[in-house]
Image (cartoon, grey):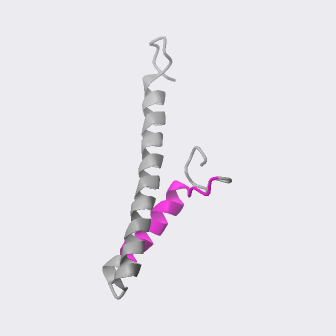
Amino acid sequence: MTDDGTTTAGATGTPGYEQARDELIEVVRRLEAGGTTLEESLALWERGEELAKVCRRWLEGARARLDAALAGPEDGTPAE
């Protein structure tokens, strides 16, 4: 993963935030449209759960970085 979450991680194959989000949107669209078999629907649901976890990890990482940046240096002086 890259720090900004925009690209796919090289060796791990973990998608970046935008890629995971876009695929998740497509999974939801297909599930809402219907017309899939039970097995296809279950596979889509499972993929959607995996993608949601990836997005959640990216967002939690971004929140932690933002919190750290807002907290400033450990000596108590405000961040510039």
**Count of numbered circles in the view:** 0
- Would you place residue 31 above or below residue 73 in this image? below
Q: Position of residue 50 (x, y in %)?
A: 44, 60
- Name which residue lies at 61% across and 47% down: 2
Q: Position of residue 67 (x, y in %)?
A: 42, 31
Q: Position of residue 72 (x, y in %)?
A: 47, 21
Q: Nearer the viewer, residue 3 or 70?
A: 3
Asked whether 16 falls inside the magenta stretch, the response is: yes
Q: Nearer the viewer, residue 36 or 33?
A: 36
> Please, which residue is most extreme toward the front here?
39
- Name which residue lies at 51% across and 59% down: 18
Name the dominant secondary structure of the magenta segment: helix
Hey, which quadrant is residue 35 in on the image?
A: bottom left
Q: Position of residue 58 (x, y in %)?
A: 48, 48
* Residue 3 as seen in the image, left or right of residue 41: right
> Please, which residue is most extreme toward the top here?
75
Q: Nearer the viewer, residue 20 or 76?
A: 20
> Please, which residue is most extreme toward the bottom here?
35
- Would you place residue 25 above or below residue 52 in this image? below
* Residue 73 as seen in the image, left or right of residue 40: right
- Name which residue lies at 32% across and 84% down: 34
- Name which residue lies at 42% across and 42% down: 60
Hey, which quadrant is residue 71 in on the image?
A: top left
Asked whether 22 falls inside the magenta stretch, the response is: yes
Query: Which residues make up the magenta segment?
Result: 12-30
